Every structure is written in structure tokens, then in C-alpha cells.
Image (cartoon, rainbow, N blue to C red):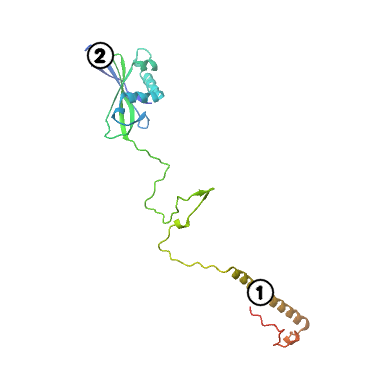
Amino acid sequence: MPTFKAPQYSKMINATTKAAEPCYTFLIEFVDSEETPTFVGDDTTSLSLESLQHTIQENVTWWNGVVQSFLQASAKLFSKPYTIQQIHKIAKHTLQGTEPSQFPVHVTVQPVTIQIRNGGFWVHWKYTTEPLQIDIPDLAEPDDTVQSTTSLPVHAPVIDGVHELNLDDLPIDKNATEVPLTLDPPTKFYDKHKVKEARLKAKLAVYRAQHHMTRYYEKYGTELTDSDTGTGSDTGEDSEEEVQL
């Protein structure tokens, strides 16, 4: 709530009676952080007492608080207590400010003085304006210095929650070179597996032969020669070829 300075006493000439009448002016001070009523002005006609009245009605709780604070701060100066409703019945308002050069604008209104004169309760308001600019702080501003080198098309249709992507729409790297894609025949993998299996069996056969020869030597003290292992000739059809691993 604002603070109210001690009243300044002066005399004003009554326009009807031409008599000098007392005038008590109270200065109203708001702290910078305190918010006061606002509205949007679309043109010059919106900077009027009608707009001010509508704004006060929309912020009647705030305005009642201002009047109540004034009555409490100045209670010792009045000959009898007054209520907010009594003040509203006799209150009159004026509005002043600097008209902006362009519209629309954000208008802030604020009472600056209260004058009690000629049996009336005058509230003088001032308005300030700022260009109307809408800002959405939740949206991050794009960074012009960072550009994506690759982007996917955003217009791909959605079917059952799955995005369908046309490969023809994908961007092509200008520095890329075309490399032919060759696929091995299906039988190559099978034949490769058979070769590995045969090699494994050959290694196992050599291991077993060496194991038996070692046991023979440990038992009889002599090594087993090739002539002791078969009856056929070395060049016969039944002879086995040397295994190379």
C-alpha cells in the first residue's frame, strides 16, 4: 500500500461563488516494486476517464485498500470517522499523462494526489505507457550461428504411430563418393563354416595322435614308427595325405 504525506494547505477560488475556499492536498507515494492497475490502450480514446473507471472496477479490492489506508493515515485530521462507501459517493477523478506516438500500448495508472476541496474528494491519476510487446520466455530463441548440416523431412506421413520416411527425400552429402555395395552369396557363409569345422577336427586328430604316441613311449620305451601303424604302402590308395594346418 502507498504512503500519504501530511496535507498541503492552500486556497482555491470557487468557480460558482467566486469565494476562496480551503484545499487540502495529500501526496501519494508508491514504492517502485509495487504494482498498480494496468490496461491495454488501442488508440487515443482509450486514454480516458471511462477506461480508468473500468480499470478501477476490475481492481476494486486494490482501490478499497488504498482508500482504507488513506483514512487510517489521516484519521486524526478529520472531525469524524468516514467509511470507504462514503468516500466512493463523493469521489471524483481526473486523469493526466503523456500520449504515446503509436498504439497499442501497455497503460499503467496510479493515483498521485488526493484533494479535499469544496466538499468534494478529488483523486488525481497519472498514466504511463509502454509499447505493447508479447514475450514467450518458455520458447528458446534459435541460434543463427549453429546450422544443422543434415535434416530429415518433417512432412512424412504417420501410420499407426510410425513415421514413414521416403529415402529419396534424405539430403545427400556433396562430398560423399559413391561406393558400390556388394553382397556375398548365401553359400559362402556355409562353406566358410565347413572349412572351420574341418580344421578343428584335424587339429583334434593331431592332438589325439600325439597323446597316444606319448603314452606308447612311456609304456614301452620306444617310439612308434610309420611301418608299425599300417600294412599298406606309402603310395597306396588307403594311405592318408599329410595334414597341413
Q: Residue furthest right?
A: 220
Q: Which quadrant would the N terminus be assigned to in this image? A: top left
Looking at the rendered structure, the number of numbered marks drawn on it comes to 2
Residue at 62 percent across and 72 percent down: it is 191
Residue 152 x/y as whole percent: 45, 54
Residue at 28 percent across and 29 percent down: it is 44
Going by the numbered disc 2, the residue's amino acid type is: Glu
Which image quarter: residue 37? top left
Q: Residues within 10 Å of mark 1 (few under 14, many from 20)?
A: few
Q: Earlier in the sequence, mark 2 or mark 1?
A: 2
Query: Which of the two residues, 24 or 172, is positioned nearer the viewer here?
Result: 172
Label 2, label 1: how many angstroms apart (C-alpha)? 125 Å
Using the image, tell me which numbered label, if any, was put on residue 21: 2
The correct choice, above or below, for 118 with respect to 180 in the image is: above
Query: Which of the two residues, 72 or 142, is positioned nearer the viewer here?
Result: 142
Residue 19 x/y as whole percent: 22, 12
Q: Residues within 10 Å of mark 2 (few under 14, many from 20)?
A: some
Going by the numbered disc 1, the residue's amino acid type is: Ala
- Mark in the foreground, 2 or 1: 1
Query: Which of the two residues, 41 or 62, is positioned nearer the viewer here?
Result: 41
Using the image, tell me which numbered label, if any, was put on residue 67: none
Kindly state the secondary structure of the residue where label 1 is placed.
helix
Q: Which quadrant would the C terminus be assigned to in this image? A: bottom right
Mark 2 in CB contact with mark 1 (< 8 angstroms): no
Residue 230 x/y as whole percent: 75, 85
Residue position for label 1: 198
The correct choice, above or below, for 237 with respect to 87 in the image is: below
* Side of 173 relative to 106 (left or right): right
Residue at 33 percent across and 28 percent down: it is 109
Which image quarter: residue 51? top left
The correct choice, above or below, for 12 with respect to 130 in the image is: above
Residue 179 x/y as whole percent: 47, 67
